[in-house]
Image (tube, rainbow, N blue to C red):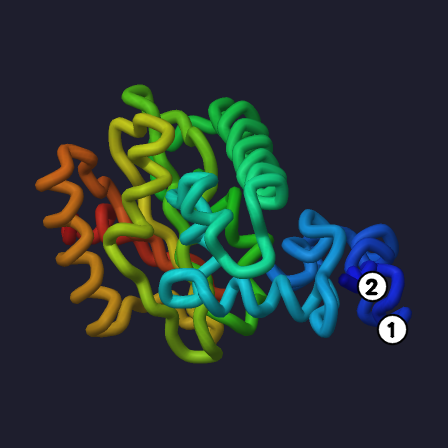
């Protein structure tokens, strides 16, 4: 069987070289995954394999990897246990790094979250939905992006929102998403999903203590407006 090596990709499509030149934050999910996979297979280069694997994940979301055991991940065509273990090890290493870095930030008001995340998301052209699991003292354990949307909206599933919190034994969570329009005022859909997630948190005993919407003009806090 002929194995498609990453070096056989066109120069402009080589994820490892793009990471070195531009930084990991500039790579797509598929490019990052391709670096971990290292090789493709006959008739499918490693980048195409990475794209296909993501397309086969639940709802085609990379965050699904957070709650897939190695045996389940290995059943995806072309993976196997060795590559599945590499992917899960990378995810766990990233989670540990985030937990240890994030634990130094204590959230006593929404402004702390805005100061932390606005520089990153103020000019984003796509909508991102994040969860900030907190300790009992309101220290941030990690940042977990659970959804990335189109120019106008993102789709959020309660399961994906609470999995990161359960994994790190969070006492409570803060929801955060950005508005690419720049206007942080919440939409009717924002209000609806907030009510759903607040109720889900109540049932799981992981309360949602705030939902913060980021925009180029500032932020909107559901808690500060008495809506949570």
Circle 1 residue: 10
Which residue: 38% across, 70% down? 154
Query: Would residue 88 be seen by someone viewing this image from the given angle?
Result: yes
Where residue 178 sits in the image (x, y, percent)?
A: 43, 62
Q: Is residue 179 left or right of residue 122?
A: left
Instruction: Give the answer, above or below, for where 208 lies relative to 140.
Output: below
Residue closest to the eye, 37 or 179 = 37
Which residue: 11% across, 40% down? 202
Does dot 1 land on a helix, a strand or a loop? loop
Where residue 63 sits in the image (x, y, percent)?
A: 44, 52
Q: In this view, does 40 lie to the left or right of 22?
A: left
Which residue: 57% across, 37% down? 85
Q: In this view, does 88 lie to the left or right of 44?
A: left
User: Quadrant where the N terminus lies?
Assistant: bottom right
Q: Which residue lies furthest to the top in this view?
A: 137
Residue closest to the eye, 47 or 181 = 47
Q: How far apart are marks 1 and 2 (CA)?
A: 7 Å
Which residue: 49% across, 69% down? 55
Disc 1 vs disc 2: Cβ atoms closer than 8 Å? yes
Residue count near mark 2 (Cα–Cα under 10 Å), binned few <14, some 14–19, many ≥20: some
Instruction: Give the answer, above or below, for where 112 lies relative to 57.
Output: above
Q: Quadrant of residue 165?
A: top left
Residue closest to the eye, 77 or 226 = 77
Circle 2 residue: 14
Query: Would residue 111 be seen by someone viewing this image from the given angle?
Result: no
Does dot 2 land on a helix, a strand or a loop? loop
Where residue 228 sits in the image (x, y, percent)?
A: 16, 48
Where residue 126 sits in the image (x, y, percent)?
A: 51, 71
Residue count near mark 1 (Cα–Cα under 10 Å), binned few <14, some 14–19, many ≥20: few
Which disc is residue 125 wearing?
Answer: none
Q: Residue furthest front?
A: 1
């Amino acid at each position: 069987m002929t194995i498609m090596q990453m070096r056989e990709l066109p120069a402009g499509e080589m994820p490892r070289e793009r990471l070195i030149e531009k930084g990991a934050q500039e790579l797509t999910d598929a490019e990052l995954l391709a670096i971990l996979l290292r090789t493709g297979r006959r008739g499918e280069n490693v980048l195409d394999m990475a794209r296909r694997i993501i397309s086969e994940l639940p709802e085609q979301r990379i965050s699904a990897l957070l709650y897939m055991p190695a045996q389940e991940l290995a059943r995806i065509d072309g993976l196997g246990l060795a590559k599945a273990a590499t992917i899960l090890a990378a995810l766990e290493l990233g989670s540990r790094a985030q937990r240890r870095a994030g634990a130094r930030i204590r959230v006593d008001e929404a402004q702390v979250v805005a100061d932390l995340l606005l520089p990153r998301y103020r000019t984003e052209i796509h909508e991102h939905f994040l969860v900030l699991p907190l300790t009992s003292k309101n220290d941030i354990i990690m940042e977990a992006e659970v959804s990335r949307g189109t120019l106008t909206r993102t789709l959020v599933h309660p399961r994906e929102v609470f999995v990161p919190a359960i994994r790190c034994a969070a006492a409570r969570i803060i929801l955060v998403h950005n508005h690419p329009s720049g206007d942080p005022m919440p939409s009717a859909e924002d209000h609806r999903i907030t009510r759903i997630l607040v109720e889900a948190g109540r049932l799981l005993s992981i309360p949602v203590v705030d939902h913060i919407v980021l925009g180029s003009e500032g932020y909107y806090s559901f808690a500060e407006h008495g809506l949570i």
